[in-house]
Image (cartoon, helix red, strand yellow):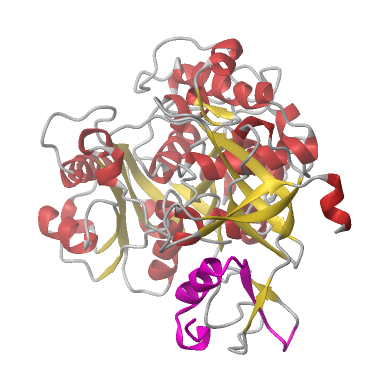
Amino acid sequence: MENVKDLSPLAAYVEYCKRGSLAYQFCPDDGTAVFYPRVINPVSGSPNLEWRVSKGLGTVYASTFVHKRGEEPYNVSIIEVDEGYRMMSRVEETAPDKVKIGMRVRVRMNREDENRPYPVFVPMETSDEQS
Amino acid sequence: MNNLKRGSVAIVGAAESDLGAAPPDTSPLDLIAQATHRALEDAGMKLSDIDAAFVSSNQMRMVPQNVCEYLGLQPRYFDSTNIGGASSLTQLAHAQAAIEAGLCTTALITYGSTQRLASRALASPREYWFYESVYRPLLPVGGYALVASRHMFEYGTTREHLAQVAVAAREWALLNPKAWEKKPLTVDEVLNARIVSHPLGVRDCCLVNDGGGAIIVTSAERARALKKPPVYVLGVGQSISHRFISCMRDFTTTAAVHSGKEAYAMSGLSAKDVDVAELYDCFTITPILFLEDLGFCPKGEGGRFVSDGNIAPGGNFPVNTSGGGLSYCHPGHYGILLLVEAVRQLRGECGPRQVKDCEIALANGNGGEFATECTVLLGGPSTV
């Protein structure tokens, strides 16, 4: 495993994805969760950003399904991650039009491209919240 | 608030190029030149009167050089700000600042596109950005669809409300001989159209046209000596919120809150003073948000505000009187055409779609997916 400190923000993020982790940055100076990853905190301007791994739980904030001609519809959602940031993703394992705002979701790595895995989400069972 | 002076400059010429579908091998520069020529004729001025060029395009890398070479201009001042559909409105603020500072006296603001001829993919190539591109959000429509989904969730806005925006735009377009769309449109037709990115269907999306426009801006003093009544710049405001939709802080409030506040403060006006609003309508959700954020109705009430023909011809508050990007023309960046229509309404040149006693017009340009907003307040001779 490469040392993420030597990697660009994107390469470090992808490296975490390869390990199965949804990573984000945290600024100890002001407690801001920063996403997407970058070299300074856009709230304070501080370069002191630490990598953290999210628990991978979140809530759907906005959702659409895209229907291109000749293709199956697919979901695109904005997920509010529990650690306090938002990201674009896709909710899978449910029909694209059944994804609802407010739905609780859990991360899963999409590994169709082993060199560039990326996080998607799946609906949570009620029991997931207690675990 | 900015330090620009209310009414220090005026728009003295305004024109479109040919709109719709350009003949084969037309370049964006051909359309820019055509619109510039017409705007100068409208102003009673000549090319040699222009000493500043504020130009924008998605299809050229060094737009000021392209435009100035083609037109034979040697401007003292130039600017090629590209912030998407708000570019020309922001450039009006830049032109005002440059004229006030004595950097130039008479500015050309122009934009042109052959996106229909060249294809959207070639005319406005998308940036690859890992954090969104892997999810294939089908931008720009997908970004607006996400915002619409949140507005529906928080405020009970419906697809019928969105459809009302498209229907009102079509009714205005039927009164505008230059509009692309020529046939009536019903709410049911909008609702039953193919879904592109839910809740937005094909009829919630703007046109994809070739076209361009130009306006000529000069000092209020010079403007009063010209042939047509000046259209004064009473207020301008600009605000950037984000670049990528996933970074929009609050999906139901746009940067138009800030750009509007600045434009109102500079002009000393408020929403109740506005006679006509030209609001960027790349998708049906946008006028709904701008009506809220610019103070025409309370937050969350935009969907109800656009219903029952309220913004259509004969309604209480005229919006997008040209037919808008939805039914008149959308050449990729629609901002310049918002200004052209506002100028014509204030001059009383709009024939059957003319708004009665139109003295104050508001135009709101939007760039990216609600990424940048620029609000402009214009007024006729009675307002200064």
**Towards the viewer: A21 or B356:** A21
Q: Is residue B252 visible?
A: no
Q: Is residue A8 magenta?
A: yes
* Quarter of the N terminus of chain B within the rendering: bottom right
Measuring from the top left, give residue B312's x and y in whole percent: 60, 21
Name which residue lies at 25% across and 37% down. B119
Measuring from the top left, give residue B190's x and y in whole percent: 55, 17
**Towards the viewer: B273 or B339:** B339
Is B98 placed above or below B159 here? below
Name which residue lies at 48% across and 37% down. B282
Measuring from the top left, give residue B33's x and y in whole percent: 18, 45
Q: Is B331 displayed left or right of B309 in the figure?
A: left
**Towards the viewer: A45 or B81:** A45
Is B315 placed above or below B7 here? above
Is B215 placed above or below B297 here? below
Q: Is residue A108 visible?
A: yes
Write the start and end of the magenta stretch as one range: A1-30
Name which residue lies at 60% across and 11% down. B188
Measuring from the top left, give residue A71's x and y in whole percent: 43, 29
**Towards the viewer: A88 or B143:** A88
Q: Is A85 displayed left or right of B132 in the figure?
A: right
Q: Is residue B195 magenta?
A: no
